[in-house]
Amino acid sequence: MLIAGQIIVSIVLIALVLVQDRTSGLSGVFGGAGATPYQTRRGLEKTIYWATIVAAALFAILAILNLVI
């Protein structure tokens, strides 16, 4: 059951990372658009950002639980 949950969360995490804007994070440093280094996330971009953090935390928790159990 944990493995299936981890697979589903990993697919969601991959999708969320791919949907994010290319200028956010380190990709902007290495040839992304010339935006300011600090920009405020608004609307859908902010939701995707926080959903990525939640999915990554959930993935880590499931991985640790999978090791313990």
Image (tube, rainbow, N blue to C red):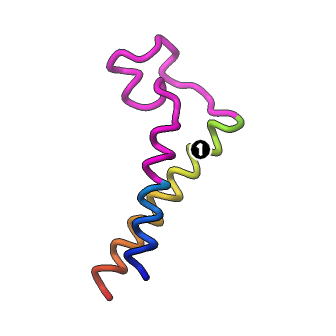
* Front-lying residue, 12 or 34: 12
Q: Residue at x 68, y 33 (%)?
A: 42
Figure check: 67 above or below 34: below
Figure check: 62 above or below 13: below
**Amino acid type at image mark 1:** Ile
Q: Main secondary structure of the magenta part?
A: loop
Q: Quadrant of the N terminus?
A: bottom left
Q: Position of residue 3 (x, y in %)?
A: 37, 75
Is 55 inside the magenta-drawn segment?
no
> Does residue 23 appear left or right of residue 29 in this picture?
right
Q: Secondary structure at mark 1?
A: helix
Is 28 inside the magenta-drawn segment?
yes
Q: Quadrant of the C terminus?
A: bottom left
* Front-lying residue, 60 or 17: 17
Q: Residue at x 46, y 64 (%)?
A: 8
Q: Position of residue 21 (x, y in %)?
A: 52, 29
Q: Position of residue 39 (x, y in %)?
A: 57, 25
Classify residue 56 by image quadrant.
bottom left
- The residue most toward the bottom is 69
- The residue most toward the right is 43
Q: Residue at x 36, y 21 (%)?
A: 29
The crowding category of the residue bearing disc 1, from other C-alpha atoms within 10 Å (few below 14, some 14 to 19, many at least 20), is some
* Front-lying residue, 6 or 68: 6
Q: Position of residue 40 (x, y in %)?
A: 62, 29
What segment is highlighted magenta in the picture? Answer: 13-42
Q: How many marks?
A: 1
Figure check: 41 above or below 28: below
- The residue most toward the left is 67
Q: Which residue is mark 1?
A: 48
Q: Residue at x 52, y 16 (%)?
A: 36
